[in-house]
Amino acid sequence: MNRRLDIGVRATCAAIVICGLVLALAGSGERPAARLRVMERRGRPGRYAAQFEAMSTDVLMEIAATGPEAAHRLLHAARAEIEGLASVLSAYDPQSDVSRLNTAGSALVAEPTREVIARAVEVSELTGGAFDVTYAPLRELWREAARRGSVPSEHELAEARAMVGYRKLAGDGRSVLLKGRGMRVDLGGIAKGYIIDRAVHALQDAGASSGLVDIGGDLRFFGEPAGRQKWRVQVRMPPGQKGALVLQVPACAVATSGDQARGFRVGDEWYSHIIDPRTGKPVRHAASVTVVAPDAMTADALATALSVLTPQEGMGLVDSLRDVECMILERTPGGPTRRLTSTGFAEFIEH
Ligand code: AMP
Ligand code: MG
């Protein structure tokens, strides 16, 4: 199982037994990989879960349903939503909206792409440009640096920085235009959250009253959990961090940024995959950031953005936002990681 899958959910998953139910997708000519295995949770009658891979990570969904057929119908609808959106928003699929836009500099794009870019721009405004989906030329510069084994020069950094800037994104309601030379977008810091939200809506629209959608450890709960008032989630911790942290939250989204495994090496030094668009350099101070928010797109984008902002800036921002809380694990020079929490975060921590 992918290590990015939330440990708590992994524990939940381990408690799942296959109840002998493997329902094939409608259309039996599908490849085995296309089958969706729906399992009833042990000791939790009426709670069903399914797990599969999308966007190179693990997806776990769990719902309340009246029976296995109903569960399959709901979960199948949500998986179709996830897979459809992933192919539109991915930077790796050459046919995706993002790839076509990056290649041509302008493209007619689907409504999800416009929606994610519009929200990304709002988060850019909110964070003074710390979050910026046009940061992609910097990502490429650092990938090249990793290949050649030496960090970019100040000149290279300045050149790539000049290609970045969410203010140079334009749209007319149907298409998106990159107005600057060399501009490119990468929705990696926000798309996962958007897709989680859309999957939750797909489940709700299909009639699910309660459940969760987890993509790569970022997740959103909806409705009431089985047999308790609050949802429980174990926060992913950076490597070397002792002790587990479990949150008890109402129906909301929880996202964590700081996945060490996604960073890269240049020479002897390990760098984060999150880049500060203002300096052009990978961020260093945040070992991990966890955001609790009403929706997953907000939680996902803010977790990335708060990894860029200083903890003081980040806390100030979060305290100004309604229903958003965060925890920042800050690296201190030579010392242990320092844990900072926003005003309302402490009440989520399970003791
Ligand atoms: P997450 O794991 O949600 O924090 O997302 C990290 C991803 O966000 C990276 O893999 C990049 O695709 C993207 N990213 C990195 N730096 C930034 C940035 N400053 N603004 C927006 N997206 C970023
Ligand atoms: Mg993010």
Image (cartoon, rainbow, N blue to C red):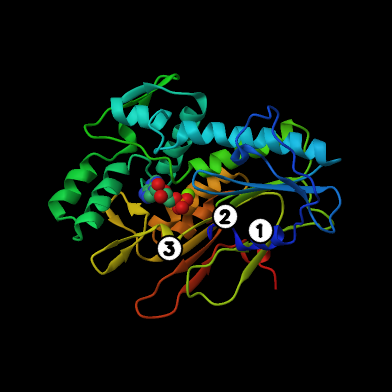
Q: Is residue 39 visible?
A: yes
Residue 157 pos. (x, y %): 19, 50
Between 212 and 310, the one lying in front of the other is 212
The answer to whether the residues at label 3 and label 2 have Cβ atoms under 8 Å apart is no
Residue extending farthest to the left is 155
Name the residue: 48% across, 75% down: 240
Badge 2 marks a residue whose secondary structure is: loop
Tell me how far mark 3 sits from mark 1, CA to CA. Answer: 19 Å
Residue 46 pos. (x, y %): 85, 47
The answer to whether residue 135 is left or right of residue 90 is left
The answer to whether the residues at label 1 and label 2 have Cβ atoms under 8 Å apart is yes
Residue position marked by numbered label 1 in the rendering: 9
The vertical placement of 207 against 322, above or below, is above
Q: Amino acid at mark 3?
A: Gln
Residue position marked by numbered label 3 in the rendering: 260
Dot 1 alpha-carbon crowd within 10 angstroms: few under 14, some 14 to 19, many 20 or more:
many
Tell me how far mark 1 sits from mark 2, CA to CA. Answer: 8 Å
Name the residue: 86% across, 51% down: 45
Residue 200 pos. (x, y %): 66, 39
Residue position marked by numbered label 2 in the rendering: 217
Q: Amino acid at mark 2?
A: Gly
Name the residue: 56% across, 63% down: 236
